[in-house]
Image (cartoon, rainbow, N blue to C red):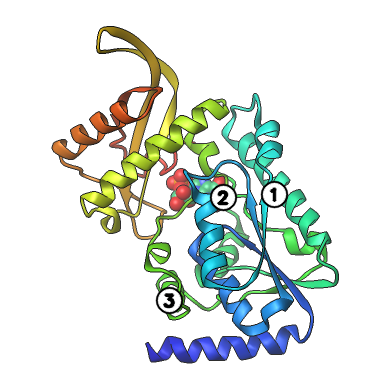
């Protein structure tokens, strides 16, 4: 695409002009926006950039390894893999309130990022994958919505706190343009087309108290569910799909024995921007087959529900 090719060159020139010979840090989440930001910065300033990937222990099955190896294999950028799962999971022990979970994770994220940033001597800039809709939203929100449904704690407020200047190369782009730019930069298609994943990760897909045991079961079940969706060729028709482990055990029967295990909720929605959403109308065959596979393949789950709530009145995530 020639327009994206031109945009890419223009952005690289702008970044070089803004940053000069100074150092830049960037938080990679594994999502499209931060990935494109990191790769663009790397093209512009090479070794002056250091990316930090914070693993909060709430990622999906093999996700940290996949993200890190995608960057290490395809791009020769400075990347710190910060495995801080013990810290995050320790702080979340006994926490069951959704907003307390988000605040705990958001605060720790800032602390951890700051700790790694401090190790990079002379860093003056923070690169962020802010998109045009984010810019618009923060303007239109200045009047203030009267009700906050969920506080999204990502890296907002980070630069001021750390005394860093911002580099936001995607500020003029919409999501589909960022995807096109990612394509232009050689980001694998499987990465570009990934469903959105929330900053607090699996914490908000584990309603109630989070335990390592539940997280492990959830990771396996979610992987089977997504595998089913891909095998049926439905992944790209769906805006977001995931499993959530419910805070209840139910009785079941397997072979000659009684089971008393967790119940799982499957969620899948179509949406344009995540503000409203419709539940995805899977066939009964698909749901039956998926339920059977999950119960057979994942120890710890003996019952599967499908969430047929649209947004509103539901939200996409369960918390
Ligand atoms: P809800 O659940 O509010 O989700 O209908 C709308 C979209 O936002 C994502 N989401 C979050 N993203 N931090 C994030 O970065 C959060 O705390 C958070 N909560 C929800 C959700 O995955 C969906 O794409």
**The disc label shown at residue 36, or none:** none
130 up-or-down from 266: above or below: below
Q: Mark 2 CB in 8 Å range of ligand 1? A: yes
The answer to whether mark 2 and mark 1 are in CB contact below 8 A is: yes
- Mark positioned earlier in the residue sequence (2 or 3): 3
Mark 3, residues whose alpha carbon is within 10 Å: few (<14), some, or many (≥20)? some
Q: How many marks?
A: 3
Task: For marks 1 and 3, give the CA distance.
Answer: 28 Å
- Quarter holding the N terminus is bottom left
In terms of image quadrants, where is residue 282?
top left
Between 75 and 135, the one lying in front of the other is: 75
The answer to whether mark 2 and mark 3 are in CB contact below 8 A is: no
Residue 213 horizontal/vertical position (percent): 53, 26
Tell me if 263 is positioned left or right of 41 in this view. Answer: left
Work out which residue is located at the far front of the displayed protein and give it.
Answer: 73
**The disc label shown at residue 109, or none:** 1
Q: Is mark 3 on a helix, strand or loop?
A: helix
Q: Is mark 1 on a helix, strand or loop?
A: helix
310 up-or-down from 297: above or below: below
Mark 1, residues whose alpha carbon is within 10 Å: few (<14), some, or many (≥20)? many
Q: Residue at x 60, y 82 (%)?
A: 43
Task: For marks 2 and 3, give the CA distance.
Answer: 22 Å
Task: For marks 2 and 1, give the CA distance.
Answer: 10 Å
Q: Which residue is drawn at 44% across and 69% down?
A: 175
Give the residue pinned by disc 3. Answer: 177
Give the residue pinned by disc 2. Answer: 199
Q: Is residue 230 visible?
A: yes
Tell me if 33 is positioned left or right of 2 in this view. Answer: right
- Mark positioned earlier in the residue sequence (2 or 1): 1
63 up-or-down from 162: above or below: above
Q: Residue at x 55, y 37 (%)?
A: 203
Mark 2, residues whose alpha carbon is within 10 Å: few (<14), some, or many (≥20)? many
């Amino acid at each position: 695409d020639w327009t994206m090719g031109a945009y890419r060159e223009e952005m690289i020139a702008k970044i070089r002009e803004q940053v000069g010979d100074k150092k830049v840090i960037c938080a990679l989440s594994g999502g499209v926006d931060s990935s494109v930001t990191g790769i663009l910065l790397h093209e512009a300033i090479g070794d002056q950039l250091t990316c930090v990937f914070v693993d909060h222990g709430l990622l999906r099955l093999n996700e940290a390894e996949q993200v890190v190896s995608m960057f290490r294999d395809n791009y020769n950028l400075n990347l710190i893999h910060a495995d801080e799962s013990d810290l995050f999971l320790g702080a979340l022990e006994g926490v069951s309130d959704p907003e307390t979970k988000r605040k705990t994770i958001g605060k720790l994220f800032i602390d951890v990022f700051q700790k790694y940033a401090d190790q990079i001597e002379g860093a003056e800039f923070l690169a962020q994958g802010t998109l045009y809709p984010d810019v618009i939203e923060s303007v239109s929100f200045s009047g203030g919505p009267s009700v906050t449904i969920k506080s999204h704690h990502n890296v907002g407020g980070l630069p001021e706190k750390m005394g860093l200047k911002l580099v936001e190369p995607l500020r003029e782009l919409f999501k589909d343009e960022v995807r096109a730019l990612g394509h232009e930069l050689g980001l694998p298609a499987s990465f570009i087309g990934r469903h959105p994943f929330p900053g607090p990760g699996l914490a908000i897909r584990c309603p109630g108290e989070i335990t390592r045991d539940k997280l492990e079961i959830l990771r396996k079940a979610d992987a089977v569910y997504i595998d089913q969706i891909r095998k049926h060729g439905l992944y790209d028709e769906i805006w977001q799909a995931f499993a959530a482990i419910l805070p209840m055990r139910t009785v079941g029967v397997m072979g000659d024995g009684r089971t008393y295990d967790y119940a799982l909720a499957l969620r899948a929605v179509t949406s344009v921007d995540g503000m409203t959403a419709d539940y995805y109308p899977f066939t009964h065959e698909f749901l039956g087959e998926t339920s059977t596979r999950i119960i057979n393949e994942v120890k710890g789950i003996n019952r599967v529900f499908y969430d047929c709530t649209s947004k509103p009145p539901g939200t996409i995530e369960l918390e």
